[in-house]
Image: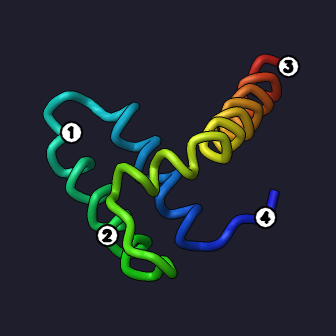
């Protein structure tokens, strides 16, 4: 699936926040909100970071599915 580089950056930052170690969460959260602020500034109408996350929710779920499939494929090749 083709995504804008900014949407891809948001998804990567969100994924990093959800999967990082507890000690790394503050830095990951800051990175996510910095990218969300960039997206909010580029929006045609002003948007809060939470609104950007909400608007991208379904696309993020597809992004995570794709990442899981890629990880499974790597594991499959390691096992064989």
- Label whose residue precedes the other's in the sequence (3 or 4): 4
Dots 3 and 2: beta carbons under 8 Å? no
Badge 1 local density, few (<14 within 10 Å), some, or many (20+)?
some
What's the residue at 49%, 45% (across, down)? 54
Whole-percent x, y for residue 37 in the image: 31, 69
Label 1 element class: helix
Badge 3 local density, few (<14 within 10 Å), some, or many (20+)?
few
Q: Return the residue at label 3.
A: 80
- Label whose residue precedes the other's in the sequence (2 or 1): 1
Q: CA distance from mark 3 to mark 2?
A: 44 Å
- Label whose residue precedes the other's in the sequence (2 or 4): 4
Label total for image: 4
Dots 2 and 4: beta carbons under 8 Å? no
- Label whose residue precedes the other's in the sequence (3 or 2): 2
Relative to 12, residue 17 above or below: above
Dots 3 and 4: beta carbons under 8 Å? no
Dots 1 and 4: beta carbons under 8 Å? no
Badge 2 local density, few (<14 within 10 Å), some, or many (20+)?
some
- Label whose residue precedes the other's in the sequence (1 or 4): 4
Q: Return the residue at label 2.
A: 37
Q: Nearer the viewer, mark 3 or mark 4?
A: 4
Q: CA distance from mark 1 to mark 3?
A: 35 Å
Badge 4 local density, few (<14 within 10 Å), some, or many (20+)?
few
Whole-percent x, y for residue 60 in the image: 60, 44
Label 3 element class: loop
What's the residue at 14%, 34% (across, down)? 23
Q: Return the residue at label 1.
A: 25
């Amino acid at each position: 699936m083709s995504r804008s580089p900014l949407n891809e950056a948001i998804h990567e930052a969100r994924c990093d926040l959800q999967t990082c170690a507890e000690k790394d969460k503050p830095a990951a959260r800051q990175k996510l909100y910095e990218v969300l602020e960039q997206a909010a500034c580029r929006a045609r109408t002003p948007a809060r970071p939470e609104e950007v996350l909400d608007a991208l929710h379904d696309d993020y779920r597809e992004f995570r599915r794709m990442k899981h499939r890629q990880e499974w494929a790597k594991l499959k090749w390691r096992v064989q």
